[in-house]
Image: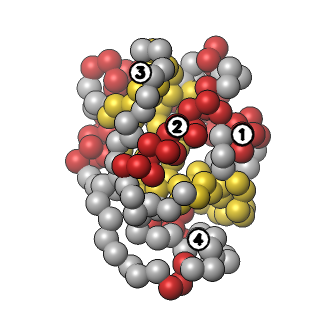
Amino acid sequence: MKPVSHLDSYRPQITAGPPPVPDLSMPWEARVARADGYDLHLVHRWNQAPHVAAFWRQAWTLPQWERRLEEQLAGDDDRPLLISWHGRPVIYAEVYRAARHAVARCYQARPHDLGLNLAVGELAMTDRGLVRSLLPRLTDALFEADPHCTRIVLEPDVRNTRAIKSFEAGGFVAADEIMLPGKLALLMVCRR
């Protein structure tokens, strides 16, 4: 795999802390998802939805989702988020440190690179331009929250053309096709 940037091999290797929680402006709001109650049931239900399950492949049981969220909240590698639009939760997101993720085997990840996974939970809310509208604000907020971060990556399944078009419209550029556990993905990058 070729480097995403010619500077990758020259960057000093430094340790990055946990991924930041973005501070979004209205009509958007992001908050860390809890591993119980409403949040747990919402994340579980959304991941059961066919339009999400087809590409995320995480249509797990409620106890499995509870364990997953607890692990994410206890660790420093990724943060589960619920993103609301006009006060209504519409997107489940995971912000992760790319260097500590499977994607790091596919490109030369820098310690402060961030990765994103995004899913619009309700089918009725898809095809409304939510992701296209959110992404520039979300990437700006993540860059602001971590001044050392110079790249944010996405790795959608190559078959998920709807998501890929939304990500491109939101400022991400395709870099390469990569193999990740369980999928052939398109590595997409947004640079500071």
Residue 72 visible in the picture: yes
> At x 52% / y 37%, what residue is drawn?
137
Q: Residues within 10 Å of mark 3 (few under 14, many from 20)?
A: some
Q: Quadrant of the N terminus?
A: bottom right
**Residue 169 tag number:** 1
Q: Is residue 58 visible?
A: no
User: Which residue matches tag 3?
Assistant: 42
Which numbered tag is attached to residue 137?
Answer: 2
Against 43, residue 185 (above or below) is below
Nearer the N terminus, badge 1 or badge 4?
Answer: 4
Q: Earlier in the sequence, mark 3 or mark 1?
A: 3
Left or right: where 169 falls relative to 34: right
Mark 2 and mark 1: Cα distance apart in space: 13 Å
| SS at badge 2 | helix
Point out the tag, 4 or 3, that comes first from the N-terminus. 3
Residue of label 4? 107
